[in-house]
Image (cartoon, rainbow, N blue to C red):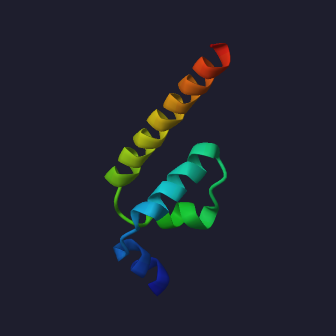
Amino acid sequence: MSDEGSNSNKKLSWSHMLLSVCSAFFGVQSDKNRSADFTSGRLWPFIVMGIFVAVIFIFVIVIVVKLILH
C-alpha cells in the first residue's frame, strides 16, 4: 500500500508521459503503466501531450499522402 502512496506524489518525466501517451494512442499500454499514470495526480500534462501527439500524427499522415499523390 505504501507503494501506491509514493506513486501519487511522484512526478513523471516528460519522456515517460510521451511514451505513455504514444502507447495509449496505439492501444498497447500496459495496465501497470496506465495505473501509474492515473495515480500521478496530474491530468493536464497528459492532455497537452495527447493533443500534441495527435497533431503530429495528423501532420505526418498529410505529408505522406501528399508525397504519395504528388
Q: Position of residue 32 (x, y in %)?
A: 60, 67
Q: Can see residue 38?
A: no
7 lies above or below 64? below
- State the quadrant of the C terminus: top right
How many marks can you see?
A: 0
Q: What is the residue that sits farthest to the front in this orientation?
A: 70
Q: Position of residue 43 (x, y in %)?
A: 35, 54
Side of 37 where 43 appears, left or right: left
Q: What is the residue that sits farthest to the top in this orientation?
A: 70
Q: Can see residue 9?
A: yes
Side of 59 where 70 appears, left or right: right
67 lies above or below 4? above
Q: Nearer the viewer, residue 6 or 11?
A: 11
19 lies above or below 2? above
Q: Position of residue 63 (x, y in %)?
A: 55, 25
Q: Nearer the viewer, residue 2 or 67?
A: 67
Q: What is the residue that sits farthest to the bottom in this orientation?
A: 2
Query: Which residue corresponds to the image point at 46% horizontal and 62% vertical from the top-left?
Result: 15
Query: Which residue corresponds to the image point at 34% horizontal and 59% vertical from the top-left?
Result: 42
Query: Which residue corresponds to the image point at 53% horizontal and 64% vertical from the top-left?
Result: 35
Query: Which residue corresponds to the image point at 64% horizontal and 47% vertical from the top-left?
Result: 27
Q: Position of residue 9 (x, y in %)?
A: 34, 75
Side of 66 where 51 appears, left or right: left
